[in-house]
Amino acid sequence: MGHTKVHCTAAVTDKLPRWRKESGEGWVTAEYRMLPHSTHTRGRREGDALKGRTSEIQRLIGRSLRAAVDMKELGAWQITIDCDVLQADGGTRTASINGGYIAMVLAMKRMVAEGHIAALPLINSIAAVSVGIVNGEAISDLCYEEDFAAAVDLNLVMTGDGRLVEVQGTAEEEPFSISELNDLITVGLPAIDMVTDLQKEVLGK
């Protein structure tokens, strides 16, 4: 997305988390990392002790992708989405959700082809975009410079049929109004539609 590049992969296993094993339902989770040279200056490589930002982002990715899945239909399988940021220019979490959704569906298609599940356990598609207020104007898909200058920074996650999964926003300076929030959602809608169309183009029916 723009100059942001995220490598997204999906791994399937029959080893569910302990608390999930007796439920009869599957699980989707995510891991997120920024590679040391994905930013302008080298960042420290993260191991198992995650930064708060990293932990929060991977929880967001997991929550967003689970909103697309019928866990009963997935059955006793876990899908783990790995999102590794190769190049960061703003919107890494939204790019991870968009690419993660594609990786997840490709994995599900393979599961159907190999006879592990009868049909795709999907109840919707998922797309995300960053929006913000920069110089008094609501814009979508912020690059690093726009994100740095934004008075309001917001991430929008939606289903393919136009329902909200998550609205994650912060006033960087002055608090913002309900009207400005509505403007941000409005400017994000066509961007979400564009991402959804691109996902359909990649995945087919």
Image (tube, rainbow, N blue to C red):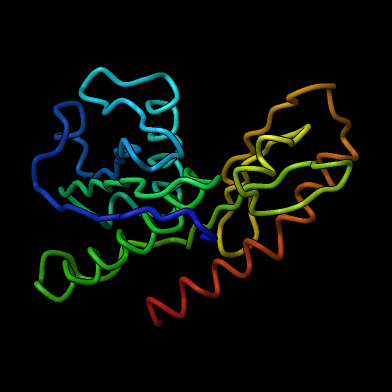
Residue 178, given in percent of the width and then of the height, sits at 87, 34
- Left-right relation of 33 to 171: left
Residue in the foreground of this view, choosing between 28 and 102: 102
Residue in the foreground of this view, choosing between 60 and 131: 131
**In the image, residue 171 above or below residue 182:** above
Residue 106, given in percent of the width and then of the height, sits at 27, 68
- The residue at 69%/27% (across/down) is 170
- The residue at 31%/55% (across/down) is 7
Counting every numbered tag in the picture gives 0
Residue 74, given in percent of the width and then of the height, sits at 25, 55
- Which picture quadrant has residue 28? top left
- Which picture quadrant has residue 120? bottom left
- Left-right relation of 108 to 165: left
**In the image, residue 175 above or below residue 10:** above
Q: Quadrant of the C terminus?
A: bottom left
**In the image, residue 9 above or below residue 46:** below
- The residue at 67%/32% (across/down) is 169
- Left-right relation of 70 to 155: left
Residue 189, given in percent of the width and then of the height, sits at 71, 59
- Left-right relation of 97 to 84: right
Residue in the foreground of this view, choosing between 194 and 42: 42
- Which picture quadrant has residue 100? bottom left
